[in-house]
Image (cartoon, rainbow, N blue to C red):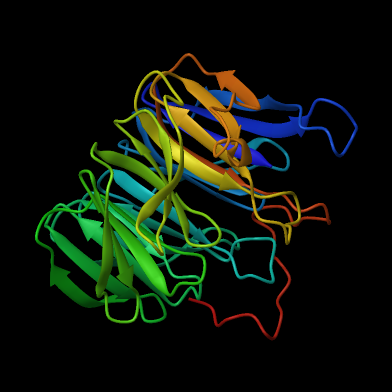
Amino acid sequence: MSLIAGSYERFIWGFKLKPLTHDPLSQSLNLTQIFSYPSHIAPITTVAAAGPAAASGSSDDTIHIYDLSSAASLGPLHHFSSSITSLSFYCPPNLSFPRNLLSAAADGTISIFDTEPFVLLKSFRSHKKCINDLAVHPSGKLALSVSRDGCLAMSNLMRGKRSFCCRLGKEATIVKFDGSGERFFMASEEKIGVHLAEDARLLLELDNQKRVLCAAPGEGGILFTGGESRSITAWDTNSGKVAYCIEDAHSTRLKGVVVLTKDGGSDDEPYLVASASSDGFIRVWDVRMAAKEKPNPLAEANTKSRLTCLAGSSLKSSKRPRIGKSTPKEEDVAEEV
């Protein structure tokens, strides 16, 4: 498992989560740094990871691409005229390598890249103002975005254009699909709305009491959130209640939370969650302990920088294609964007 974090000081940080012993049943873990350098010339605003691929976006109007399997930087993408605010990979369920990279920008545009080898397919305007967040449906055919214009937009990724837009009561800053794509979550200040994806109907609303700055869907209807409360809260989105909470997970506000899975995937319910804070710490937690007592982190790393974002990836144990090379084509894979 790998983690990638961005910082206000322009540094990108890459870590691998490894056991301290060779015993597969051991719970002793270590975050081993695999790279760190100033990849941008302005603060990093967003990161994304899938399989061996990772990307970072910045207010310097560029995206940088990384190969996690070789801990190498593959250089920047220069196709933008404004800050990059959100990044998301689309990886078909039967492939270990992402097929597309999607980016959102401060000028309201969404760009779609083919990852073979990161060429721009389409760029189109989805909002009138800065896009706050972007979420790709598990099918890879559509995406939701929220913006400072106070709107929720749906984009048809097959045609490369916005297909629907509605005005919200107030500006939303986070939008995420659940694993099935049947529901999505939208956060505005301290409130998180649980919506039906079919018609965007509000099913229930979660009150976090303090501003939510990051969120990650888990298994079984669980949604992990973090922010100004400095805690990691696991919500049962079926009942609208708190399932459990890791209180005071960090000394300052959380800027990223990631649900981790074992290398190669696993049928077991994921129990590892990583968090990053503006205090510079990245921590990995066993959420199974949260319901019993206040857990201690299984592993942590101090970057000594002001972290702004966090993403995670599970690298499969089988042979991986190198980024920038052609990946295998399969007949049952969804149509190219």
Tell me which residue sits at (73%, 39%) in the image: 70
Q: Residue 4, can we see it?
A: yes
Q: Specify whether 325 is left or right of 210.
A: right
Q: Quadrant of residue 236?
A: bottom left
All told, the count of numbered labels is 0
Residue 227 image offset from top left, x and y in percent: 33, 35
Residue at the farthest top position: 304
Residue at the farthest bottom position: 331
Residue 113 versus residue 328 in the image, above or below: above
Q: Looking at the image, which is closer to me, 217 or 206?
A: 206
Q: Looking at the image, which is closer to me, 257 or 190?
A: 190
Q: Residue 64, can we see it?
A: no
Residue 16 image offset from top left, x and y in percent: 69, 33
Q: Specify whether 196 is left or right of 96.
A: left
Residue 279 versus residue 286 in the image, above or below: above
Residue 254 image offset from top left, x and y in percent: 38, 31
Residue 26 versus residue 270 in the image, above or below: above
Residue 23 image offset from top left, x and y in percent: 90, 34
Residue 265 versus residue 299 in the image, above or below: below
Tell me which residue sits at (9%, 61%) in the image: 169
Q: Specify whether 187 is left or right of 114.
A: left
Tell me which residue sits at (48%, 38%) in the image: 310
Tell me which residue sits at (34%, 60%) in the image: 185
Where the N terminus falls, by quadrant? top right
Residue at the farthest right position: 22
Q: Quadrant of residue 13?
A: top right
